[in-house]
Image (cartoon, rainbow, N blue to C red):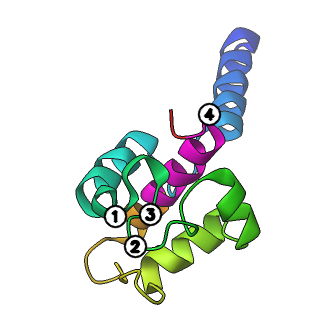
Amino acid sequence: MNKLLKLVLVTFWLLTSTFALPASAADIANGAQIFSIHCAGCHINGGNIIRRGKNLKKQALKKYDMDSIEAVTFIVTNGKNNMSAYKDRLSEQEIQDVAAYVLEQAEKNWR
């Protein structure tokens, strides 16, 4: 193999292995769609029509230790109190997507 071809192959390998997204990477756009279908009825604009203080705003997520992908994924999967479980309605990937969307929106103050 000539040097140029080796260089191109090594460069390609480095770029694809270093910057490739993992298979489970969240799809924020998909999360937004899922949120609008399954969550917005109770959590429009990050609010909560049932329990006002337990909303999806950054301050409340932090207060209730819900400010991580793991925490949001857990509650979407399993539910809690008035919050329904979605493990039988959404795939694990869809739950990851909606959790990532919620956290991104909380960072943006739901704008």
Is disc 1 surrounded by few (<14), some (14 to 19) or many (20+) residues within 10 Å? some
Q: Between residues 83 and 25, which one lies in front from this camera angle?
A: 83
Is disc 4 surrounded by few (<14), some (14 to 19) or many (20+) residues within 10 Å? few
The location of residue 46, given as percent across then percent down, is: 48, 52
| Residue beneath the point at 70% across and 73% down | 64
Residue 42, numbered circle: 1
Is disc 3 surrounded by few (<14), some (14 to 19) or many (20+) residues within 10 Å? some
The first of marks 4 and 3 along the sequence is 4
Query: How far apart are the two marked residues, 2 and 1, measured between alpha carbons?
Result: 7 Å
Q: Which residue is the extreme one toward the bottom?
A: 81
Residue that label 4 marks: 16
Q: Is residue 48 above or below residue 32?
A: below
Residue that label 2 marks: 50
Residue 48, numbered circle: 3
User: Mark 2 or mark 1, which is nearer to you?
Assistant: 2
Magenta segment's dominant SS is: helix
Magenta stretch encompasses residue 104: yes
Is disc 2 surrounded by few (<14), some (14 to 19) or many (20+) residues within 10 Å? few
Q: How many marks?
A: 4
Q: Magenta part of the protein: which range?
A: 97-109
Residue 7, numbered circle: none
